[in-house]
Amino acid sequence: MRVGEVRTGRVVSVEGREVLVELDGFSGSGKAVGRIPRGALTRKAIGHPSEAVRIGQRLTFEVMGVDLQRESVWASASACEDPTLRAFLLGLRRGATHEGQVQSVHNFGVFVNLDGEPDNRCTGFIRGPELSWLRIDHPADAVTAGQRVVGEILDVDTCRGQVQLSLKALQQDPLKAFENQEGRITTGQVTKLIPFGAFVRIADGVEGLVHNTEFRDEPVEDPGQIVSEGDEITVRIVEVDLVRRRLTLSARNLRQNGKRPS
């Protein structure tokens, strides 16, 4: 039995948190039980699994996981609830690009009607952090309803009937402009203070950390003693790590507001 394959079975128990199904095809070698969590039973809103299935009913479901020790299978009936939608989702692959039209914009993300999806099911979804490398206060700052977008497919969830997209993946990382710029002196705005340092934005979408040991020769216990959020300070680029997307900065021995840090 493989994850992703489709199986059938008969409902033998309907409980509050899950439905148990006796899997077909194991009559000669014992019984195997499929466990369908309530959230994977149907995409319709239900309060109790008994609202969607009954004992003795036959179900078709997708294998989501196999537990050999418990001799049971975790399954999703919602993944097979709409064969047309399932066929569309299985035709997509991670890493590919796909186009669509923004249906709605919310503070938690953006819903997209993907080209080719059946009956405008709005299967595409873009989380806020995947909209842009640039700093935005709300997804509406990046896209608007009705806009055509192209995104990279991050994940295809047959259980939820959803495709996770990223617009950011197809944009150039602004940090790349600072590659091989170690030693460069520039200015930036303090965006956040944390116990061990301060984050400073030196360009749109590019923030680096000034550690407490990098404000002056002697480490400071509280960065708030040196800077405040919103301050413009002068920094030196110490390290640019494109793989981990990490920028290390220093303010040591640099003039700040015409004065050299003590």
Image (cartoon, rainbow, N blue to C red):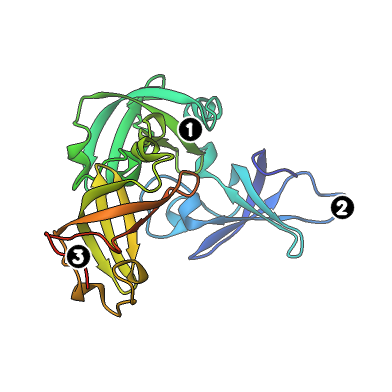
Q: Position of residue 191 (x, y in %)?
A: 21, 58
What is the distance, in whole Å, between disc 1 and disc 2 at their CAs?
31 Å
For the view shown, which residue lies furthest in the bottom direction? Answer: 221
Question: Does residue 112 lie above or below 256 as drawn?
Answer: above
Q: Residue at x 33, y 71 (%)?
A: 212
Q: Earlier in the sequence, mark 2 or mark 3?
A: 2
Q: Residue at x 36, y 35 (%)?
A: 177
Q: Position of residue 48 (x, y in %)?
A: 42, 60
- Per the rendering, the mark at residue 260 is 3
Q: Position of residue 227 (x, y in %)?
A: 18, 67
| Mark 3: few/some/many CA within 10 Å (<14, 14-19, 20+) | few
Q: Earlier in the sequence, mark 1 or mark 2?
A: 2
Q: Amino acid at mark 1?
A: Asp
The residue under label 2 is 29
Classify the position of the C terminus by image quarter. Answer: bottom left
Q: Amino acid at mark 3?
A: Arg
SS category of the residue bearing label 3:
loop
Residue 122 left/right relative to 239: left
Q: Residue at x 22, y 24 (%)?
A: 147
